[in-house]
Amino acid sequence: MLKIDRRLIAHFDWPLLLAVLLLLAVGLVTVLSATHTEEKLVSGLFWRQLSWVALGLVALCAVLPFDYHVLKRWGWVFYVFTLILLILVVFVGTIAGGARRWISVAGFSMQPSEFAKLAVIIMTASFLHHRVSEDRLHWRPALVALGIAALPAALILKQPDLGTAMVVLSVGVLLLLVAGLSLRWVAAAILIAVPVFPYVWQHLKPYQQRRLLMFLDPERDPLGNGYHIIQSKIAIGSGMWGGKGLFRGTQYRLNFLPEQHTDFIFSVFAEEWGFVGACVLLGLYLFLLYRCWVAIHRARDAFGVLLAFGVTTMIFLQVLVNVMMAAGALPVVGVTLPFLSYGGSSLLACMMGIGLLLNISMRRFTF
Amino acid sequence: MAWVTLKQREAPALLRRRVQWLLAATALVFLPVVARLWYLQVLHGEEMRLLAENNRIRLHRVQATRGTVVDRYGRVVIDSRPSFDAVFVPEDAEDVAATVENLATLLGLNSAELRALVGKKGRRPFQETVVKRDLSFEEVAAVETHQWDLPGVSLQITPRRSYPHGPLLAHLTGYVGEVGPDELKQNDTYRMGDMIGKSGLERGWEHYLRGIDGGQQVEVDSLGRRLRVLNEVAEVPGHTVKLTIDLDLQQAAHRALGDRDGSVVVIDPRNGEILAMVSHPSFDPNVFARGIRSAEWRALITDRSRPLMNRAIQGQYPPGSTFKFIVAAAALEEGVINPFTRVFCPGGMAFGNHYFRCWRKGGHGSVNVHEALVQSCDTFFYQVAQRLGVDVIAAYARKFGLGAPTGVALEHEKGGTIPDAGWKLRRFRQPWYAGETLSVAIGQGYVTATPLQMANAVGMLATGRRFRPHFVLQVESPEGEVVAREEPEEVARLDVRATTLKQIRDALRDVVETDRGTGKKARLRGIAVAGKTGTAQVVKLGKDRSRPDRLPRHQRDHAWFVAYAPADDPEVAVAAIVEHADGGGGQVAAPLVRDVLSAYFALAQERQQRNYAQDRSAVDRAL
């Protein structure tokens, strides 16, 4: 069954893989720097991240051999599976940092919400691909497609993980827009939401109101997020033009940043490599975006385009939100920086997404 | 590929066109990101680096003031006061060792301990370590004047728990202490060094009392001195807890018990409110609030008189003759006797190969149930108990709430013991002996009860209803809004005939109100009191009890008195026990209860008059 088609190898997108490998390398070095101490250069976290990277490469390769079209028919299995996991999290999840997000399986803890992003992309793409038309999308499939994203998003919001829930929902909505949802509908939805909002607001508990305000305006929380943002801004800013050099950062080492190796890894990088380094890193991401664009162009069918676009959206929403958050231009919501942040689930999901892009890209002549 | 319609073939191109715009937009979003980085790193890079080097932004938590606790009339029972703490940030000291030495000599601390404290792992950089809490005025002045020898040391004002009445209510209020490692693990909103309720009310109402911490972002100079506050969140003080306790009555009960070991419990039998609860000896919770030293702690827990034990709920004493009103109720209700049934008491009674004595050597002669209760005749109850059997007695004791914890919201409440045949089999794997029933009839043998249970039981006799005892009236938010109220919770009604109740109540009234009654020393002018004396043996039979002063102290009897008043319209129930007293319940405990009751009624009258005067003046003003 597994015939190796020469054309598959010939059309493999090596530059895309190279960009990802470079980003992974930057990530490993930064995690190493962010977690090293004077007594111990290489921390256990680094070794764990290294094994996650290896596992991510395996996951990437695992996605390559089969034709992505099977996902049209079987994608829902993955979707239902992640939904079950998300519901399980509510009951048996492990609590860390005040939120219930992890499930422990055989000593590994995984974060189903990370995989939910992929599941929503696959499910929405397979639902929408044959409904795409020149005319506008009918409101009924549009609502179903919105539901596909809203269901896991609601479960993730409950954990609570506002950042990931927003990413899931945004990916769903953007796919809908591309599939032909009229902008008028979006405008209408916003028009309905605006007058409803004060009513909903009144019915929220005071602590819920406080928490929402905190998201929108972290300065209200000077002991928590507000403090972290200031410290993150100081870390980035103190990098100046050329940075302080590898292992020379001071902000993170003194534990001013709470999640310096996960959500705030960009601050660590920017402190050590400065404006030039940060621009190079952003350039690398921009190159990755270009290769994603190429992959989308190579897709021969609507499903392929939607799938590739979904993965691209997922990755770049996170890049933009994460960097802006670290730079103090967006509220702190806890979104990882793809390929750089420490953390298995997030890395695996991104690597599987890249695997899908490569898969789509290399099968452009298989029709 | 038949399924690929023309439309399907066209679809990708259509989609790509739409996608392109979005991707272009994404690429453009990178521009503001770069602009933002330029702003931070190039435009403001210099000042950011300066801030980073001096680590000028510090986080400063402002601890919430714990809620106040007041008595039922709003008088302060627990309060908070400002305390000056010396804090140290080692990162701000050029020479940590020298500063530590200076600090140790200045504040009279052990320098080795101080070094260990400062070097403790797990401290965040630039996080303040509290070196000494609650400095005296001289110490504050010393730190202030030696500011230059003490870089990194500063003063911090934090609210400290204060118990103005010291040991008076310590068993009920409990105390606070520094949060422990287990508590930190369970609740991640606490930080090291925080104060948390460790026992009693402080622990049970922690959720209400704690409040919400506030905090400040502070910019400091290179010496760690605060320059300005950048951002601030105000603390929210804890809620006010209003107790059912009447502080005046508590003091009166405390005075009445004096320095004798024992306990006095006063409840309102109409709703279960605890009006006073004294346990002596006690301890000073202020010692815990400032941080108890290990020597002090050791002294407290090894003290033979056990000051940490709340005798009102943890002291399990044989109830002695106070138990007789329950046995009498059982006997009348079960029909084994009627009000006219007479028993002859020659001073005791032979049973098996043992002679069971009555407390009065000469005997009481022929007595019915009324006289037996009034004069506390043991022989009468020996006889009755034989007819009832231990299981029936136990069943009635349980109706009165004995043998199980009352459910008062204090930890480690004991349930006492009400033995029956099944209990003995389970406990000792031995059958019940008929002779043991005789001891049970006079509240001895295996029977034990706590003072709170006895107050509850006599209250139930008075009103026919039993409530879960509680000591919190309501909880008020800092804005004065009532956020929680503890409603009376009726747990049982006495299913006993009215005639039976009247018989017992009349007898208990005569215990106090007639000259033959054993409790006449509890008599009060103007208000009829009903009560029952008890003298509980600590050591088994055979000792000469006529001269208690000849016995070693720890072998002397406990003196009990339980009562309610006014006898015809009960509004207060009292139980008092004096451990190893110099006399029986009638001599020692009855006058004690009289003092408590007289204080209660005097206070009630005083309040009534004050209200009357207020009403009058209001009327006068209105006119």
Image (spheres, grey):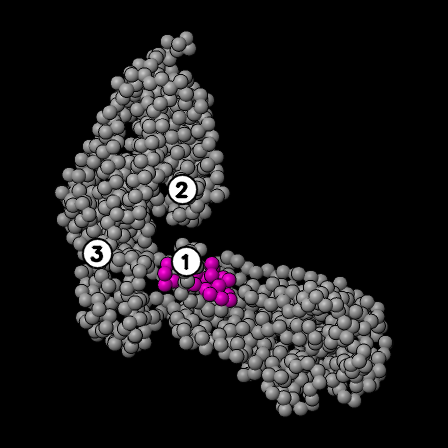
Whether residue B607 appears in this view of the structure is no
Asked where in the image residue B548 lies, by quadrant, the reply is bottom right
Is disc 2 placed on a helix, strand or loop? strand
Label 1 and label 3: CA atoms lie apart by 29 Å
Disc 3: which residue: B56
Q: Amino acid at mark 2?
A: Phe
Q: Which residues are magenta?
A: B191-211
Q: Give percent across and percent down for residue B268.
A: 63, 69
Q: Amino acid at mark 3?
A: Arg
Nearer to me, B148 or A293: A293
Neighbor class of circle 3 (other Cα within 10 Å; few <14, some 14-19, many 20+) is many
Label 3 and label 2: CA atoms lie apart by 39 Å
Locate residue B442 relative to residue A210 in the image: left or right.
Answer: right
Disc 1: which residue: B184
Earlier residue among tags 1 and 3: 3
Q: Give percent across and percent down for residue A45.
A: 31, 46
Locate residue B390 relative to residue A279 in the image: left or right.
Answer: right
Label 2 and label 1: CA atoms lie apart by 25 Å
Looking at the image, which residue is at 25% across and 27% down?
A16
Q: Label 1 is found on which chain of the structure?
A: B
Quadrant of the image for the N terminus of chain A?
Answer: top left
Q: Label 2 is found on which chain of the structure?
A: A
Disc 2: which residue: A108
Is disc 3 placed on a helix, strand or loop? loop
Q: Nearer the viewer, mark 3 or mark 2?
A: 2
Q: Nearer the viewer, mark 1 or mark 3?
A: 1
Looking at the image, which residue is at 76% across and 83% down?
B357
Q: Amino acid at mark 1?
A: Leu
Nearer to me, B483 or B193: B193
Whether residue B182 appears in this view of the structure is yes
